[in-house]
Amino acid sequence: MEKSLITYSTVDGQTKIISEKIAQFATQSSVDIFPISDNIELGKYKTIIIGASIRYGKYRKEVYSFVEKNIEILDSKENAFFSVNVVARKPEKNTPETNPYLIKFLKKIKWKPKNLGVFAGKIEYPKYKFVDKYAIKFIMWITKGPTDTSKTYEFTDWKKVESFAKNLNL
């Protein structure tokens, strides 16, 4: 059986959860899931999928480093990239063509992923430290999002994740 890889960068864990959900739909290959910071032997995989979350408007540096370091092997494989961000909760910003973070990312890198996905993330106010909680609350207030810091808000559209996964033909 062929092998596929999903490697991810996450701050609070939602990108890992989405990665695990994508792997559940694999029927043509076995899927390994590793943090992007791990030392991964990419050569053994037929397909490589990268998932990355946004925090304060940016992907983590490790995402850029991974892509830059591995661009040749990524280009030689079936590949995909998906972005997880709360702005994608808005219908007008939840596609690869309309999501500002994904658009900006693709302009910054040389790699051109063969498949792209954008998924809304999750806000877990009770889990956040004081500064993060109120910084995110302020951002949500500006963008007309939820601001009740006693609650968790999951925006991920799991049907959309399923559709993306099935389209990858893993």
Image: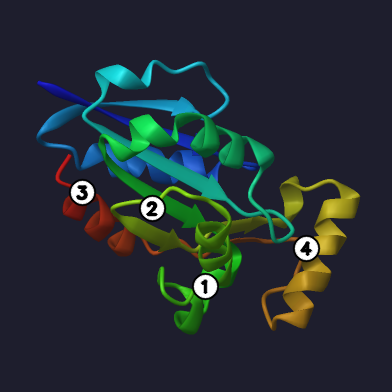
Expressed as whole percent of the image width and height from the top left, the position of residue 47 reads 25, 34
Mark 4 lies on a secondary structure that is: helix
Quadrant housing the C terminus: top left
Upstream in sequence: badge 4 or badge 3: 4
Q: Nearer the viewer, residue 27 or 50?
A: 50
- Report which residue position mark 1 lands on: 89
Quadrant housing the N terminus: top left
Q: Which of label 1 and label 3 is nearer to you? A: 3
Circle 3: residue type: Leu
Circle 2: residue type: Lys
**What's the CA distance linking mark 4 and mark 3?**
33 Å
Q: Nearer the viewer, residue 108 or 37?
A: 108
Residue 112, disc: 2
Circle 4: residue type: Ile
Q: Which of label 2 and label 4 is nearer to you? A: 2
Q: On the picture, is 1 further left or further right than 162?
A: left
Circle 1: residue type: Arg
- Report which residue position mark 4 lands on: 136
Mark 2 lies on a secondary structure that is: loop
**What's the CA distance linking mark 1 and mark 3?**
23 Å
| Residue at screen point 51% across, 16% down | 39
Expressed as whole percent of the image width and height from the top left, the position of residue 132 reads 83, 53
